[in-house]
Image (cartoon, rainbow, N blue to C red):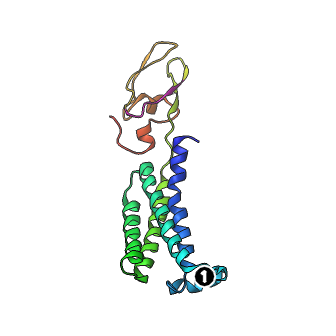
Amino acid sequence: MNANRGTRAVAFLGSIGSVLALVMAAAAPCCLPIFAAFAGVIGLSALGLDEQFVLYAVQGFALIALMGLVFAVSRHRQFGPLIIGGMAAVAMFFSFHARFSALLVYLGLGGLCVASVWNYLLSRKRKDVILQSVITCPKCGQHAEETMPTNACLFFYECSRCGVMLKPKPGDCCVFCSYGSVPCPPVQTRSLCCS
């Protein structure tokens, strides 16, 4: 498993943790009465889970959700979901360990769900950057697969067959955007280009 796929899997924990925290909260209808009807519909009340276990499980899954949101920041560089998820987790832990308030638990669970949905939408918008591009020489038609740099633009490229020096076309930031099969990484991610 490569590092990118591993980070994506850990970031997905935010969604899993939020859903499981909600399910566990529904399994404790005496502390959180709004969930009593939901627990009855999906059959959680028939499990007869210990209330103390359920409350610790809700907190554990909230921590898993928060951990997933932390790792998701490294993928999409947006702190909004993490801030909302962090405030939601603080509200829940304050309610469980300082002064119990069902309203704070509801708000905390709702905040985790909002953060997870926002995180999911950000992850869907982001696509993986392709670093391989095939440059085609306009003079001789030579095709050459090249690896694009992620930290700089390539302004000049010499064709290995005919020796012509390629430069970006007007309006393009680099030779990959002008002659490559795939535009450069900054253009792919819609971030600022080097030009």
Q: In the image, is residue 148 part of the stretch drawn in magenta?
A: yes
Q: Residue at x 50, y 66 (%)?
A: 60
Q: Position of residue 39 (x, y in %)?
A: 60, 81
Q: Position of residue 110 (x, y in %)?
A: 45, 74
Of all residues, the one furthest to the left in this rendering is 195
User: Foreground: 132 or 172?
Assistant: 132
Q: Residue at x 41, y 53 (%)?
A: 73
Q: Quadrant of residue 35?
A: bottom right
Q: In the image, is residue 174 part of the stretch drawn in magenta?
A: no
Seen in the image, is 151 located left or right of residue 63?
left
Amino acid type, label 1: Ala
Residue under pointer 1: 39
Q: Which residues are magenta?
A: 145-151
- Relative to 130, does residue 82 appear above or below in the rendering? below
Q: Quadrant of the N terminus?
A: top right
Q: Position of residue 31 (x, y in %)?
A: 49, 84
- Relative to 45, does residue 65 appear above or below in the rendering? above
User: Foreground: 146 or 183?
Assistant: 146
